[in-house]
Image (cartoon, helix red, strand yellow):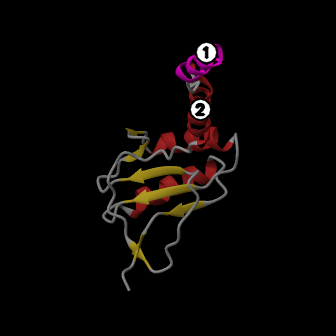
Amino acid sequence: MGRFRDSANEDASEASIDMSPLIDCVFILLIFFIVTTVFVEETGVDVDKPQAASASNLEKTSILIAITESGSVIYGGKEIGISGVQPLVRRMVLKEQIPVILQADRGAKMEVFAQVLDQAKLGGAQVVNLATSRTQG
C-alpha cells in the first residue's frame, strides 16, 4: 500500500500545465492581426475642409491628396506639387482602380484645385472626390 501512496504523491507534485501550445497560438493570432490590418495613409497636413450637406463616408483604400491654402499639393506628408499628381495616381491605379480624394483647404484657390483634379484624371483615376465635413443640422 505504501508503494501506491508514494506514486500518487509524485504524480500530483509533477503535474503542470504546458504553456508552449498557448504561446504558439498567441503568436499565430498576433501574426494574423498584423497581416490583416489596413493602414490608412494620411496626407500629413491639417486641412480645414468646407462643409457639405451631401457628405458621405468613402472607402478606406483611396489616394488622399491635400491642397493647402497656400497652394501646396501634399501626399503622404511630402509636397509633390501639381506635376507629381499624375505619376502618383498612375502608379497607384496600376494595381487596382481606387478613388482619389482631394482634401482642399477652405481657402485653397480654385485654379490649383482644378489643375490637381485634371492631373488625377489624366493619371487614370476614374473616381475623384472632394473631401468635406458634414454640416451640423
**Residue 50 drawn above or below residue 71:** below
Magenta residue span: 1-13
Magenta residues, dominant SS class? helix
Query: Regarding mark 2 in the picture, which secondary structure is present there?
Result: helix
For badge 2, the amino acid type reads: Ile
The answer for how far apart the CA atoms under marks 1 and 2 are is 52 Å
Quarter of the image for the N terminus: give it: top right
Query: Which of the two residues, 130 or 117, is positioned nearer the viewer here?
Result: 130
**Residue 113 drawn above or below residue 91:** below
Estimate the x, y position of residue 102 in percent, counting from the top left.
Answer: 48, 57
Q: In which quarter of the image is residue 15?
A: top right
Circle nearer the viewer, 1 or 2: 1
| Residue at (46% x, 63% y) in the render | 131
Quarter of the image for the C terminus: give it: bottom left
Query: Which of the two residues, 44 or 126, is positioned nearer the viewer here?
Result: 44
Estimate the x, y position of residue 17 in percent, counting from the top left.
Answer: 57, 27
Mark carried by residue 31: 2
For badge 1, the amino acid type reads: Gly
Q: Is residue 113 left or right of residue 106?
A: right
Q: Residue furthest front?
A: 1
Q: Quadrant of residue 91?
A: top right
Query: Which of the two residues, 16 or 5, is positioned nearer the viewer here?
Result: 5
Q: Does the magenta stretch include residue 92?
A: no
Q: Is residue 10 magenta?
A: yes
**Residue 3 drawn above or below residue 137:** above
| Residue at (61% x, 55% y) in the render | 99
Q: Is residue 19 left or right of residue 82?
A: right
Estimate the x, y position of residue 64 in percent, counting from the top left.
Answer: 49, 51
| Residue at (34% x, 57% y) in the render | 47
Mark carried by residue 2: 1
